[in-house]
């Protein structure tokens, strides 16, 4: 029996609760990690926007010659294999010499969630920094700014991640030198340390949210990943509506509470 489409009849405050209750299920085919600010925008507009034109790479423009919307999702292979075996074969072949067992293990729900959490944390911290200071910058730049303002706050953040089992994120944070030095210097000069320092504890509470997509998303054009075999690409003529969302998973109790207290 087809599940009732909650998104077309629920008010945003009710819908977000239903999404949290549903979380992920066996029919979930993929997801992406993002910030709660983006989730709020999705609920406000009742649409899920794809990549903006200004940040599309050449292959994305090639795939969307008529202004279509493009999305990148982390796939769950076993679910896709049951729903769309032909596309599952394409995903498998994109791994070239790897075994079916390897691909199934690499793209299972548990491993997928680890990848999605990494994306979500980065997006959540970047978006919250932007919301507080009106400046768009990257996760690595924010970490470097934190190191220069309060090394104690930086190491406390790493300890929090380690305690949450996010070892790969900790490793990236400790070893990252991939930041724009001129941008870091400019932000520190324009904002001043005493303005940034009080916001750091709140910034580093953010973990983001995972949005899980149901099988309906596979009704659009789908492609295997171009930059990473561990992702899939979805192309839609228009922005996806809320019926494509199966459920959501806030990645911290702090953000779960914020989401449940939203007023629309």
Image (cartoon, grey):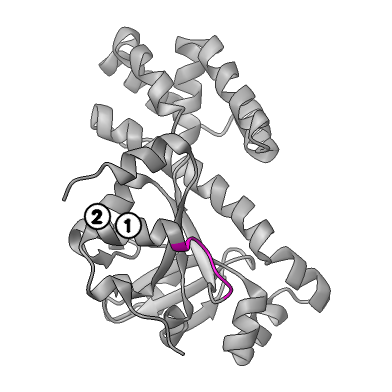
Circle 1 is placed at which residue position? 16
Query: Residue farthest to the left?
Result: 264
Is any atom of residue 79 visible in this view?
Answer: yes
Vertical placement of 225 versus 264: above or below?
A: below
Q: Residue 99's spot in the image, x, y percent?
A: 83, 76
Q: Quadrant of residue 10?
A: bottom left
259 or 147: which is nearer to us? 259
Q: In this image, 236 relative to 148: left or right? A: left
- Image-quadrant location for residue 134: top left
Q: Which label sits on residue 40?
A: none
Q: Are marks 2 and 1 in contact (CB under 8 Å)?
A: yes
Mark 1 secondary-structure assignment: helix
Classified by dominant secondary structure, the portion drawn in magenta counts as loop
Q: Does the magenta-highlighted stretch encompass residue 191?
A: no
Residues rendered magenta in the picture: 22-26
Q: Is residue 25 magenta?
A: yes
Relative to residue 151, is residue 132 drawn left or right? Answer: left
Q: What is the secondary structure assignment of the residue under circle 2?
A: helix
Q: How many other residues sit within 10 Å of disc 1, few (<14), some (14-19) or many (≥20)?
A: many
**Residue 198 percent location from the top left of the image:** 34, 13
Does residue 239 show up?
A: no
């Amino acid at each position: 029996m087809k599940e009732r489409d909650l998104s077309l009849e629920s008010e945003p405050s009710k819908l977000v609760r239903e999404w949290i209750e549903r979380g992920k299920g066996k029919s979930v085919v993929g997801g992406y990690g993002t910030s709660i600010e983006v989730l709020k925008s999705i609920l406000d507009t009742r649409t899920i926007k794809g990549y903006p034109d200004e940040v599309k790479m050449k292959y994305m423009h090639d795939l969307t010659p008529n202004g279509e919307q493009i999305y990148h999702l982390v796939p769950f292979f076993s679910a896709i294999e049951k729903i769309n075996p032909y596309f599952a074969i394409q995903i498998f072949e994109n791994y070239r010499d790897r075994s079916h067992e390897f691909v199934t293990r690499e793209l299972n729900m548990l491993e997928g969630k680890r990848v999605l959490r990494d994306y979500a944390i980065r997006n959540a911290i970047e978006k919250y920094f932007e919301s507080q200071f009106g400046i768009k910058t990257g996760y690595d730049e924010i970490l470097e700014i934190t190191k220069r303002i309060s090394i104690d706050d930086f190491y406390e953040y790493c300890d929090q991640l380690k305690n949450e089992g996010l070892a790969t994120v900790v490793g990236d944070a400790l070893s990252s030198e991939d930041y724009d030095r001129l941008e870091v210097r400019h932000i520190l000069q324009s904002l001043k340390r005493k303005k940034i320092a009080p916001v750091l504890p709140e910034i580093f509470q953010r973990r983001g949210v995972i949005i899980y997509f149901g099988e309906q998303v596979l009704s659009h054009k789908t492609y295997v990943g171009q930059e990473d075999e561990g992702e899939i690409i979805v192309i839609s003529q228009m922005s996806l509506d809320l019926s494509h969302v199966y459920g959501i998973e806030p990645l911290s109790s702090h953000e779960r509470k914020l989401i449940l207290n939203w007023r629309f």
